Amino acid sequence: SAVISQKPSRDICQRGTSLTIQCQVDSQVTMMFWYRQQPGQSLTLIATANQGSEATYESGFVIDKFPISRPNLTFSTLTVSNMSPEDSSIYLCSSQIRRDTEAFFGQGTRLTVV
Amino acid sequence: SQQGEEDPQALSIQEGENATMNCSYKTSINNLQWYRQNSGRGLVHLILIRSNEREKHSGRLRVTLDTSKKSSSLLITASRAADTASYFCATDAGNTDKLIFGTGTRLQVFP
């Protein structure tokens, strides 16, 4: 199993600013992902964080808005840039040791943009 | 995009009753997983069932998978108030590494 520390757990930000969310896994994992969960909704995959290379973004998400870093196998960051109230959501990171195994999740970052 | 759709969207039952949630998906899968989420926090993995399995048990949980119908069900027996949460199915969408989540079922168990 893997334990994921995600921070901050919550933040209230002004529109037009940026927030960087950090995700630390306690063991080396192959795959890391970032999800967004809007109020009362399911999880939507933002991107796959690739170690040492550019993230792979899902349709509707772009690097300029959600830059992602993954410098090693245990750490990743997601930045929400130039925020607007529509970015208010819970952002979650997850990891998997390999395909066909369970995913482990951080506790999420509850972001409110005012 | 959602790979899976779940029904019901919401379910309210009394303690001791059984709760059944259904998940339908669109494309071929290698496995299907069920997760639980309390109050918008992180998800907790419940059970993984592979495409060549038809049924799996874990404690009070029973999961079935019908690949011909592209559907799965999660049964929670003898429910407890502590089972109150949102439940999501997730599939691996065939040859990709990523997990795609269903729409979720909000379960409320009244004491």
Image (spheres, rainbow, N blue to C red):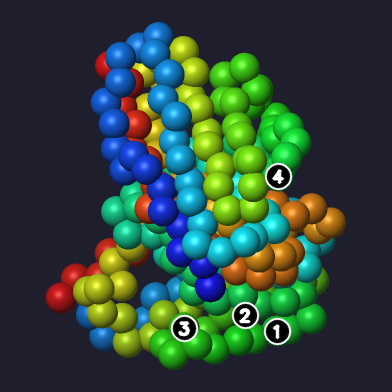
Mark 1 — on which chain does it sit?
A: B
Q: Which label is found at residue A51?
A: 4
Rounded to the nearest angstrom, the CA distance separating label 2 from label 4 is 35 Å
Dot 2 crowding, Cα within 10 Å, few <14, some 14–19, many 20+: some
* Residues at circles 2 and 1 in contact by the CB criterion of under 8 Å: yes
Q: Quickly name the residue at label 1.
A: B54
Taking the view exactly as shown, the residue that stands out farthest to the top is A16
Q: Quickly name the residue at label 2.
A: B64
At label 2, the amino acid type is Thr
Nearer to us of marks 4 and 3 is: 4
Q: Position of residue A66 (x, y in %)?
A: 57, 25
- Using the rendered view, name the quadrant where residue A62 is placed: top right
Q: Quickly name the residue at label 3.
A: B61
Q: Position of residue A107 (x, y in %)?
A: 38, 53
* Residue that appears at 73% across and 64% down: A99
Dot 1 crowding, Cα within 10 Å, few <14, some 14–19, many 20+: few
Rounded to the nearest angstrom, the CA distance separating label 4 from label 3 is 36 Å
Mark 3 — on which chain does it sit?
A: B
At label 3, the amino acid type is Leu
Rounded to the nearest angstrom, the CA distance separating label 1 from label 4 is 36 Å
Quarter the C terminus of chain A occupies: top left
Image position of B105 with respect to B54: above or below: above
Rounded to the nearest angstrom, the CA distance separating label 2 from label 1 is 5 Å
At label 4, the amino acid type is Gln
Q: Element type at marker 1?
A: loop
Rounded to the nearest angstrom, the CA distance separating label 1 from label 3 is 14 Å
At label 1, the amino acid type is Arg
